[in-house]
Image: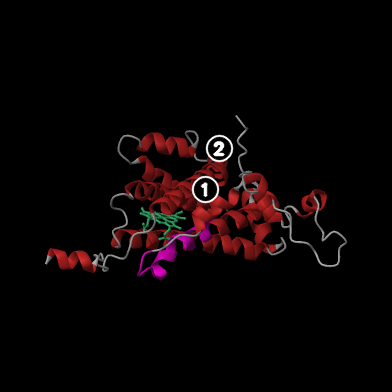
Amino acid sequence: MPKLKLPKPPVPPNFQPPPPRPGTANGGGGPLESAKEAGTTVVGWVDERTSLSGAARWMMFRKVPKGTNWFYTLGSATMFAFLSQAVTGVFLAMYYDPNPTNAYESARYITNEAFLGEFVRGMHKWGSTVMVILVFLHMARTFFFGAYKYPRELNWIIGVVLLILTMVMSFTGYLLPFDQRSYWATIVGVNINGTGPLVGPYLSDFLRAGPEFGATTLSRFYAIHMMLVPGLIAALIGLHLYLVAKLGTTAPPWLKAETDPHLREEQA
Ligand code: HEM
């Protein structure tokens, strides 16, 4: 029986030789020439090796419901505030010293002497307030638009954890300048935590890092503020956004669901 010759599969678009370039002897073709042309942009080069553009497209190019308005930008605004805190925080950490004898002096140095120090410290301080306001506004938006309902309950729960972590950032950051106000305010805050039911006393012991409020407390707050909580927030924002991309956003509650006019006629 003669051998059946199957047609060759088509060459994938990425591997097709480029069109001949005018002015070259062989039209610019040949496998070597094509190889030289492969991955002409950095994005193309990376994508050929990782196929990440598919994931980026999945995350970013999506349809949004009718009636989407400015209130839907509050989540992204909160994320921007968080990123700004992360960047300014890194610069502050280059000069800040979490040792009780040097902490106040290092904060003073940042404000009065370091290049752009006052600006960066001001951004971080005001940015923390902005982030807290935005996270509450974003929560109010999702609540009043009913976005916490099925199937987005898990995203609401992740949001509640993000809200608590944002408050923990504010609380732990407040002690770091180690001036009179931050010292006494944090003692009050730790004592309030201690009055909580069941876990309260353990929580205040953990925060104080010992029987007395002092050097160990400052290190503990610094570690929580610098590493533990920002890491958790970053990971949870990733999960939060994954669910937003997967489930889509909720349409505003005042929009009625559209039914097919054809079906409506049949029902009548
Ligand atoms: C660091 C804090 C947070 C960040 C960066 C963040 C970010 C976002 C972003 C970018 C969206 C997309 C839609 C939009 O912006 O409205 C979103 C949606 C959502 N967020 Fe947040 N969020 C945070 C905290 C919270 C909190 C505290 C809650 C509630 C307790 C929450 C609940 C939700 C829900 C339920 C959705 C889905 C909205 C919908 O389907 O329309 N988030 N979040």
**Residue 160's disc number:** none
- Disc 1 is placed on an element classified as helix
**Res. 94 visible in picture:** no
Q: Position of residue 255 (x, y in %)?
A: 27, 68
Q: Is residue 75 magenta?
A: yes
Q: Amino acid at mark 2?
A: Thr
Q: Is residue 38 magenta?
A: no
Q: What secondary structure predominates along the stretch shown in magenta? A: helix
Nearest to the eye among marks 2 and 1: give it.
1
Q: Position of residue 103 (x, y in %)?
A: 62, 49
- Disc 2 is placed on an element classified as helix
Sequence-wise, the earlier of marks 2 and 1 is: 2
Q: Amino acid at mark 1?
A: Ala
Relative to 229, 114 lies left or right:
right
In the image, what residue occupies the spot 71% across and 62% down?
A: 113
Q: Residues within 10 Å of mark 2 (few under 14, many from 20)?
A: some
Q: What are the residue bounds of the magenta stretch?
A: 65-82
Front residue of 182 and 72: 72
**Residue at the disc numbered 1:** 234
**Residue at the disc numbered 2:** 216
Find out if the beta carbon at label 1 lies less than 8 Å from the nearest ligand 1 atom. Answer: no
Front residue of 77 and 9: 9
Relative to 262, 220 lies left or right:
right
Residue 6's quadrant in the figure? top right
Image: 127 above or below 238: below
Front residue of 13 and 170: 13
Q: Residues within 10 Å of mark 1 (few under 14, many from 20)?
A: some
Taking the image in four quarters, ligand 1 sits in the one at bottom left
Q: CA distance from mark 2 to mark 1?
A: 26 Å
